[in-house]
Image (cartoon, rainbow, N blue to C red):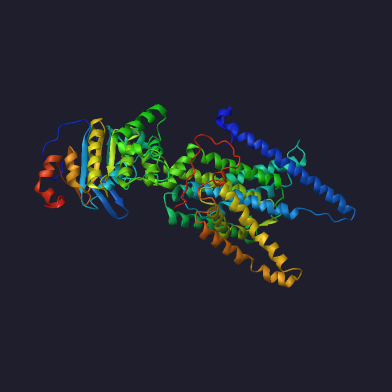
Amino acid sequence: MSGHPVLGSRPARPPQLEVSELHVSYGAIKALRGLSLKVGKGEVVALIGANGAGKTSTLRAVSGMLRPAAGKILLDGQEVTGLKANELVPRGMAHAPEGRGIFPNLTTQENLELGAYLRRDRQGIGRDAEACFKLFPVMAERRRQLAGTLSGGEQQMLSISRALMSRPKLLLLDEPSLGLAPQVVKAIFRTLKEVNQREVSILLVEQNAHLALSLAHYGYVLETGEVVMEGSGGELLASPEVRKAYLGE
Amino acid sequence: MGVSPSSGLRGWTRGVAPLALAVAVLSVLQLGLNAWDSYADGQAALGAEVFRPDFLVYLSSLVAVNVVLTVSLNIVNGMTGQFSIGHAGFMAVGAYIAGKLSFEVKELAISGLPHAVSDQVLFTLSLLAGGAAAALCGFLVGLPSLRLKGDYLAIVTLGFGEIIRVVVQNTPALGAALGISGIPQHSSLFMVWLWVFITVLAARRIANSSHGRSLWAIREDEVAAEAMGVNTTGYKVRSFVVSSFFAGIAGGLFAHFVPIINPGSFTFVKSMEVVVMVVAGGLGSTTGAILAAVMLTLLPEGLRSLFLAVGGGDASLAQKVDQVRMPVYGVLLVVLMLVRPQGLFGTKEIWDVLPKWLPRLPRAPNSPPARGKEAA
């Protein structure tokens, strides 16, 4: 790989997502400059980095909301570069966007059903919705309530659940802890672990590096659109550079 | 809608049944009107003056055209949440294509058909051609510009509307600034209101379909809709094309009952008029759009009669009072926006805001829950 330090070892897994040499620009501004990363099957991978490092741009390029200027994206070994979001959802990619993006005028239940927009199996949808309510019991109490009246944490849970409703193999999460109380964040991350144990790979973008790295099997540190360090979650957490730059020590 | 699925009617018949009813009612109206006309002709031959509803027919055609425009613009501005302010441009395309076609073929008749029938067939064909041309323009404008959002899209559509007008104004074949006169006056009460009906039916069917839900999702949160797998660009362009088609039809109808069409009829002011009607009716509400279009078209006329009455028999005073008419219209709009910023019905339909004790049609079990941005 390129010249950045790699900490710790990574157990070999068949790749779920492979991104190589990804470039993304907003006009003249380059957001990503040759970024490469891998997510194995059943793996949780965290992207950490400061504001503007290109974390969200990476997610948006992977999920087809941004068109990459150059680079290659493989999902399950198939090239999906340049495909749009609506073509990627049926291939098993789900994106819970930053700022949650729930529909405030629909109920919790209806929001979940929208997550199954491309599915046609009514019974399966119903079953999966129930599974989501089991995953986040707080949401079950809010089932008939307009989603706009839910608390921030509940909305985040709804956003994740809705992404799960498309039965993804790969879940992209953008800042799930943003603006939430520590207790709620803890609950959400516990559930993410549970989700991951059901063979859903997760690519997680977080500002809260400590939290993200303690959940993730593997992590990448981004700076100005490039990977500057990668390694297993534990090793990154222990590394002095990461501790200094992102954990405030 | 209106018929519950349990009655066993298939989807498409639910559209056809009301259509048949509308055709019947409109035919009776039209035949009555024709009968009255020939009676009036007879009386005139005897030297007697009989009231002729010509002006009323004209006014009602104007209302109909505005309803078609408003309901179709509502598909883009209301249901999809994309702010387009170039509707007059698409209307102009329809008006000029349909008008010019009718003008060219006015000497022709389809053999084997009575004259009147052949005229109506040709009229319908040129209307459809005008609609199709407008839809094509909608596609061409929409494909690149619907990637833009909000103000930017508004500016692009505004620019398109003006381009059409300027192109027409400088094309001698289309009469340049003088416009086209002598387009056969084939439009009738039956035809315009039939198209109103078709437009409203199409709009409501779209709103209640999964297509319509996708549009609503885009309007509420585009990123979320995209993340869910909605083909946002595709749906936006499709809604734009449908909307432009009906704008073209409205233009075609318009061209066949006004004595002359010229670029002055399709300026930015006309576009704004339609936007005002959509906003006043409530973004996303089809019935609101209808009501607003009817009211705002009739209001200036109604105010004219009112002020003439206030002025009494004194013609000069009446004229002076009449000049206050347009400012009053403006003030009424401002008041409406202050009192009901979400428009007459908000995102609801009329049957959602009627008092609960009124008898109503059974509602399809999964018709969209009306909830509004009332609190917003």
A236 or A109: which is nearer to us? Answer: A109
In percent of width and height, residue B13 lies at 60, 31
Q: Is residue B96 visible?
A: no
**Residue projecting furthest to the right:** B46
Q: Quick check: A204 above or below B264?
A: above
B249 or B309: which is nearer to us? Answer: B309
Horizontal placement of B358 versus A144: left or right?
A: right
Q: Quadrant of residue B182?
A: bottom right
Horizontal placement of B279 versus A186: left or right?
A: right
Q: Quick check: B160 above or below B241?
A: below
In percent of width and height, residue B111 lies at 75, 37
Q: Is residue A247 visible?
A: yes
A244 or A63: which is nearer to us? Answer: A244
B11 or B248: which is nearer to us? Answer: B11
In percent of width and height, residue B314 lies at 75, 71
In percent of width and height, residue B26 lies at 70, 42
